[in-house]
Image (tube, grey):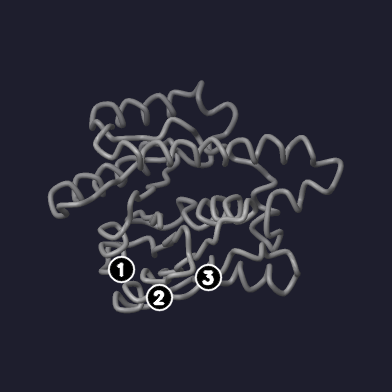
Amino acid sequence: MTILAFAHSKGGVGKSTLCLLIASELARNGTRVLIIDADQRQQSCFQWVRRCDAAGSLPSTLRAEVATKTDDLKRLLRDPDADVILIDVQGSMNDLLIAAIVASDLTLVPCKANVMEMVETVKLFEWAQVNLKRAPLRLVLNRVEGIDTNTIAFQDAVRLIRENALPALPTFVRARKVYEQFARDAGTLEHIGREAAKAEQIAKARANVIGLIADITAAIARPHEP
């Protein structure tokens, strides 16, 4: 079993959407995926699964449960029917975030490439390094617009990553309109791709997610490499 956590000390960084994109792509290929929604306020992942189930678009090997306390999380992590467990936690420092990081094979920390969000991200990495004996965190640059890489703001964010030696996955998650449609009740990106006009967009979006999954697999296989 593989356990991935999606965590940040602040909200609005795209954790839940990223979690769902990875979960649905894995489930599309037959992997038995359990999402543990540990966001006590929004439960975005759990609600998405319910919407997709009602719409008939939910992959058959994807399900979600809610954890409101650490005992819930520990119990759900023992699920014998899951090949991969994804934990989505609330965007704040709390006991569930700590428990998720410690339990995971890898914790993904999504962040937009701007200085304001990067400063908070640096603080989370520093806190984890000081306070947790086991903290396999990896930064994921998320919602990257096509022109972002040419901007001073992006270069400033990259400078902060390098100066603080933050371990980052090489694949950027691009900002895409189809991700917004997916987040309603699409179930999978492939489901949206049935619309001929969106086939090319979906192919690029899926390639982006698949590239990120490959990075995650490689990072888990080499846990001590940056």
Residue under the point 61% across and 69% down: 49
- In the displayed structure, 62 sits above or below 192; it is below
Mark 1 burial class by Cα count in 10 Å: few <14, some 14-19, many 20+: many
- In the displayed structure, 130 sits above or below 223; it is below
> Does the CB distance between marks 3 and 1 fall below 8 Å?
no
Circle 2 SS class: loop
Quarter of the image with the C terminus in it: top left
Give the image location of residue 146, x and y in percent: 60, 29
Decide which of 219, 20 is in the foreground and name it: 219
Residue under the point 43% across and 30% down: 170
Mark 2 burial class by Cα count in 10 Å: few <14, some 14-19, many 20+: many
Residue under the point 42% across and 44% down: 111
The kind of residue tagged 1 is: Leu
Which of the 4 quarters of the picture holds residue 185? bottom right
Precedes in sequence: disc 3 or disc 1:
3
**Residue 96 bears which disc, if any?**
1
| Disc 2/disc 3 C-alpha distance (Å) | 10 Å
Which of the 4 quarters of the picture holds residue 57? bottom right
> For the view shown, which residue lies furthest in the top direction?
150
**Residue 64 bears which disc, if any?**
3
Precedes in sequence: disc 1 or disc 2:
2
- In the displayed structure, 171 sits above or below 130; it is above
**Residue 116 bears which disc, if any?**
none
The kind of residue tagged 3 is: Ala
> Does the CB distance between marks 2 and 3 fall below 8 Å?
no
Residue holding disc 2: 67
User: Left or right: where does residue 43 sit relative to residue 47?
Assistant: left
Quarter of the image with the N terminus in it: bottom left
Circle 1 SS class: helix
Decide which of 98, 156 is in the foreground and name it: 98
